[in-house]
Amino acid sequence: MLTAAPEAVAALTVDTGSRGREISEVIAVARRAGVAVNECVGLEIDTSGGRGAHRGVVASLRPFAYAELSSIVEAGPDLIVVLDCVQDPRNLGAILRTAKAAGAGGLVLPRDRAVSVTAAVVRGAAGHAYGIPVARVTNLVRALDTLRSAGWWVLGLSSGAGASLYEVSLPGRVVVVVGGEEKGIRPLVSRYCDELATLPMAGGVESLNASVAAGVALYEVRRRRQGR
């Protein structure tokens, strides 16, 4: 987290009983980045750290700063990810990390019926939640309409509907829409997609985890962009 996005860390709490080489290196990085370092005993850090192993260090994060959809549109990236009601923070974290790795220039979430960028999401993204602009919108359909009007071609991932992902064309700038864990892309949202595509799968498997499906699609876009 400190090396990927030091601006996201408000302070570090360090267990004084865990002062080994690794802890000392973390403290040095934090101080170089201007992050406050607080020392305490193990019981206190266990309480502040909540669930999960802290390994002697707990980071207090600043509130996540969302981007405006208009700023993503103005930046004009070749690839944008839109999530329709993804509710599992681990999925959102994994998608954020993959989106950054695949070169996406923005991610759009609905405000309702979807997970926001929480501490669990940041953990799932392994520090990369801050490396890509994330916009939360009141109306996802209106956001897709805005992106289409601004020149993006919208591809929705839909289990069992549409052509194979490997057969569809990907013209110009692309928006990849990934549906939620339970029901996938909602019907109204799918109507604002220029094309629906499915991931070919062997018999007996109906669908993939949302983050896995997103990863497959994003890297197919990247592969074609690189002409491989």
Image (tube, rainbow, N blue to C red):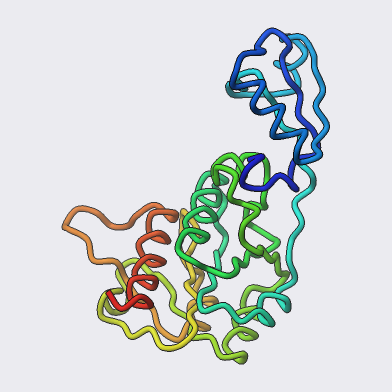
Where is residue 201? Give x, y as percent: 22, 61
Report the residue at 25% width, 80% height from top: 167
- Pick whichever, 227 or 216, lies toward us: 227
Q: Quadrant of the N terminus?
A: top right
Q: Is residue 187 left or right of residue 22?
A: left
Report the residue at 33% width, 85% height from top: 169
Q: Is residue 40 left or right of residue 86?
A: right
- Pick whichever, 106 or 111, lies toward us: 106
Where is residue 94? Give x, y as percent: 49, 49
Q: Is residue 99 left or right of residue 44?
A: left
Q: Quadrant of the C terminus?
A: bottom left
Where is residue 18? Give x, y as percent: 65, 12
Report the residue at 62% width, 13% height from top: 20
The image quarter in which residue 54 lies: top right
Q: Is residue 130 above or below residue 84?
A: above
Q: Is residue 200 left or right of residue 142?
A: left
Q: Is residue 20 above or below residue 191?
A: above
Where is residue 216? Give x, y as percent: 35, 62
Report the residue at 30% width, 78% height from top: 227
